[in-house]
Image: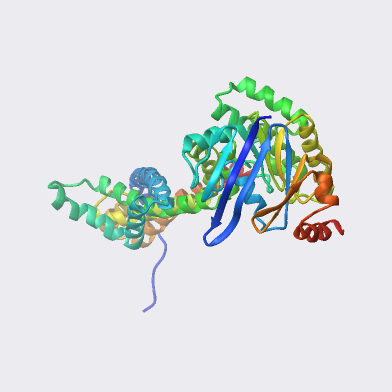
Amino acid sequence: MESQFQFDWQAAINSIPFLVKGIPYTLMISFGGLAIGFALGIFFGLLSINKNWFLKWPATAYIEIFRGTPILVQVLFIFYGLPDLIGGPIDPITAGIAAIALNSGAYISEVVRGGVQSIAKGQSEAGLSLGLSRTQTFWSITWPQAFRRMIPPLGNQAIVSIKDTSLFSVIGVGELVRQGQIYIASTFTAFEVYFVIAIMYLAITLSLSLILRLVERRGLASV
Amino acid sequence: MTQIVQMKGMNKYFGKLHVLKDIDLSVEQGEVVVIIGASGSGKSTLIRCVNGLEEFESGHLEVDGQALAPKGGNQSTLATIRKEVGMVFQQFNLFPHLTVKKNIMLAPQKVKDTPKTVANANADRLLERVGIASQADKYPSHLSGGQQQRVAIARALAMEPRLMLFDEPTSALDPEMIGEVLDVMRELAKEGMTMMVVTHEMGFAREVADRVIYIHEGKIVEEGKPSDVFDNPQNERTQAFLSRVLAH
């Protein structure tokens, strides 16, 4: 059977106003989650470098659990599983933000650990030899240098997390993909709508890449 | 004379490796002590013990009247000692994310709460002193090795230390830049700074040192005035070492 398919530009354009409503949710969940994930990443990443085993193992456990299980399972667990435990429903947006936070937090912990460990030992020795405390040495010497090296992998994680939010259509968050599914249910224009959705994700991730490249260039200019 | 550094029966191990063996050494105020020896002899480890960058396992170490206990001692003693002891490293270890001037201002501002304007004026004065005032606002990576090491010296001096440790300060430099760093060190010695210098620059040792110490496999085997150690070494290890390094 020969395909009679023709891309319907009008259908694609018509879908835009409806799909655009999903973008704020996509952005809110990804950046809300990433902000918390960054805090978790700093916390657990620094714990994981610790020589003290009692501080190190909770960090290692957290990282391995959330890196080693699919984010789809994580969000289903939070949305459908956790209410049984806490005795009340969790709103899908909160569940989405929590899933991005916990999942990206695990990866960012590794980024933080790698960044900090990549700074030569001589840097902290120089700080200590000048009389700075360990804390001062870390925050004014090691961390600023490590952070610069962390920018590219952090950007990478941000892009991964933005795309991961598409999975949250399964719990009914009105993000981009969910909006698309609703729209297609009444118009049957799957090809055009998913095409538009793909372009919208690309627009978001490419803008982020561009911003990161500028930040990186400025940050690295001095080093 | 006041003793700034006092080591008695100090021992240091890296795992099973016995790197410092019963070290007895004292350094008096204003003295320049140059420590020589083959690589791996423990000379760098010795001066790194003075400001606690290395822990030692047994013996006694006192720096500027503060006793530093074996296995690290306590943090407040370490902090007190490090405020009084400056260190210059083989690899400079300047902070690449800070300008030359900020490198120098950081410790006085953080550790001594020196007001910014004062720290700034001191940094200018120190950069003038080491001959690189014009580079103040550049980042370290834009400087030559010799200039970077002079900044590192200025950075250590900004804390107004009572003792300066130099850990092979010219070993990572191109030959044509060694002189400019040694000049600054020579100047510093002349002004009366107490210095412990680990170096392979025998000419500098002979000229500037009040005392030369030769370390072999973690032990001080020879110690004396430069003229005695270089021209009339008593220990056969020292003789062998010197004939190797002075031959070329």
Locate the C terminus of chain B and report the quarter of the image it occupies.
bottom right
* As drawn, B103 above or below A12: above
Q: Position of residue A82 (x, y in %)?
A: 19, 52
B115 left or right, relative to A153: right
User: How many numbered markers are drawn?
Assistant: 0
* As drawn, B14 above or below B58: below
Locate the N terminus of chain B and report the quarter of the image it occupies.
top right
B150 left or right, relative to B73: right
Q: Position of residue B166 (x, y in %)?
A: 69, 43
- Name the foreground residue: A76 vs B179: B179
Q: Is residue B202 visible?
A: yes
- Name the foreground residue: A201 vs A120: A120
- Name the foreground residue: B188 vs B119: B188
* As drawn, B132 above or below B94: above
The residue drawn where x is 56% and y is 49% is A119
- Name the foreground residue: A203 vs B65: B65
Q: Position of residue B174 (x, y in %)?
A: 80, 51
Using the rendered view, name the quadrant where residue B208 is placed. top right
Q: Position of residue B127 (x, y in %)?
A: 74, 30
Q: Residue furthest bottom?
A: A1
Using the rendered view, name the quadrant where residue B137 is placed. top right
Q: Is residue A202 visible?
A: no
Q: How is the image coloured?
A: rainbow
The residue drawn where x is 66% and y is 30% is B2
A44 left or right, relative to A182: right
